[in-house]
Image (tube, rainbow, N blue to C red):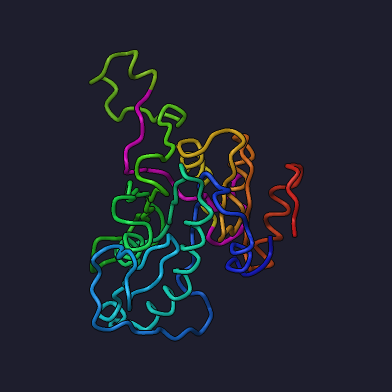
């Protein structure tokens, strides 16, 4: 679906998606001024708070950004853009749903503070580290070769997670386990080693921020069942939709870039996907 994802998300029915994957850009290309909230302190949700903020869960909460916003106005612009989209994503998740927010080292610590306020700290499930080895090498620091994926549940006790549905990995030292275990492979941990999309590989669509199907496959396998709906509001090249279709899930993809939608049309041709 082509368009600004916020009004589209607001028009969707609540609790419709088992898993939501968000891979937002850092530089939105839009000028937004940050509104400072001064003198408050984050103490978690505040039921019936006065002078706080009425939350989307029927609770009040206060968001403190004075200190973090002081570092860089771009941070304020970015989170003024992303926060309402995260609120809508919470509403759209089914009671057993999971959010996967894909960022990098520059924003992930801010994101966790915000998501703790929005979802509740008890709903934090994992921080996944996706490690890869490609690109330029820094000379004055350790080269940054990983992304961060924060995982939050709609409800801390009800979320769906099926580790047995996930493709297993080979043991790094198969000689240290039984032949049966070596043949079966091991379950992934919260650190995922996976190469980026090869510039010359068959998977490559030509879209600059394309994510590997292997990363999305693991997310969709673990956090949804066949027939469930998968949401990606920053769909880019459409990897989430392609993987969801392969695994027998339904999907909704949104992007405001006509080039992205063009790539998705070609990639998802023959899947029955409807474009609007």
Q: Which residues are magenta?
A: 185-209
Q: Is residue 127 left or right of residue 235?
A: left
So how many labels did they put on this image? 0
Quadrant for residue 92, please give it: bottom right
- For the C terminus, give its image quadrant: bottom right
- In the rendered structure, the answer to whether residue 255 lies left or right of residue 222 reads right
Q: Where's residue 89, x and y in %? A: 50, 58
Decide whether residue 203 is among the magenta residues: yes
**Residue 137 in view (yes/no):** no
Q: Position of residue 222 (x, y in %)?
A: 45, 36
Apparent side of residue 57 relative to residue 16 in the rendered image (left or right): left
- For the point 64% across and 42% down, the residue is 250
**Residue 72: x %, y % from top left:** 33, 82
Question: Which residue is at the front of the view, 269 or 84?
Answer: 84
Of residue 174 and residue 21, the one placed in the foreground of this image is 21
Work out whether residue 273 can be spotted. Answer: yes
Q: Is residue 262 magenta?
A: no
Residue in the image at 40% along x and 39% along y: 158
Quadrant placement of the N terminus: bottom right
- Residue at point 23%, 73% (across, down): 41
Q: Nearer the viewer, residue 156 or 146?
A: 156
Magenta span: predominant SS is loop
Task: Return the x and y of residue 242 as percentages of the image width and height.
Answer: 62, 44
Residue appearing at x 53%, y 78% in the figure: 29
Q: Quadrant of residue 228?
A: top right
């Amino acid at each position: 679906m082509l368009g600004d994802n916020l009004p589209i998300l607001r028009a969707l029915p609540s609790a419709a998606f088992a898993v939501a994957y968000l891979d937002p850009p850092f530089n939105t290309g839009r000028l937004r001024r940050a509104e400072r909230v001064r003198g408050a302190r984050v103490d978690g949700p505040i039921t019936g708070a006065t002078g706080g903020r009425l939350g989307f869960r029927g609770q009040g909460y206060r968001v403190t950004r004075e200190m973090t916003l002081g570092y860089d106005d771009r941070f304020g612009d970015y989170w003024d853009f992303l926060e309402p989209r995260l609120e809508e994503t919470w509403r759209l998740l089914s009671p057993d749903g999971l959010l996967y927010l894909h960022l990098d080292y520059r924003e992930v610590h801010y994101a966790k503070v915000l998501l703790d306020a929005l979802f509740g700290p008890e709903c934090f499930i994992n921080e996944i580290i996706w490690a890869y080895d490609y690109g330029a090498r820094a000379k004055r620091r350790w080269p940054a070769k990983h992304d961060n994926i924060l995982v939050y549940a709609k409800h801390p006790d009800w979320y769906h997670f099926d580790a047995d549905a996930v493709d297993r990995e080979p043991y790094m030292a198969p000689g240290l386990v039984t032949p049966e275990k070596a043949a079966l492979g091991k379950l992934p941990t919260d650190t995922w080693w996976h190469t980026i999309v090869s510039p010359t590989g068959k998977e490559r669509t030509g879209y600059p921020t394309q994510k590997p199907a292997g990363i999305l496959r693991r997310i969709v396998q673990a956090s949804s069942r066949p027939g469930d709906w998968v949401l990606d509001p920053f769909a880019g090249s459409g990897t989430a939709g392609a993987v969801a279709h392969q695994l027998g899930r339904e999907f909704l993809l949104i992007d405001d870039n006509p080039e992205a939608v063009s790539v998705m049309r070609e990639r998802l041709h023959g899947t029955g996907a409807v474009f609007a």
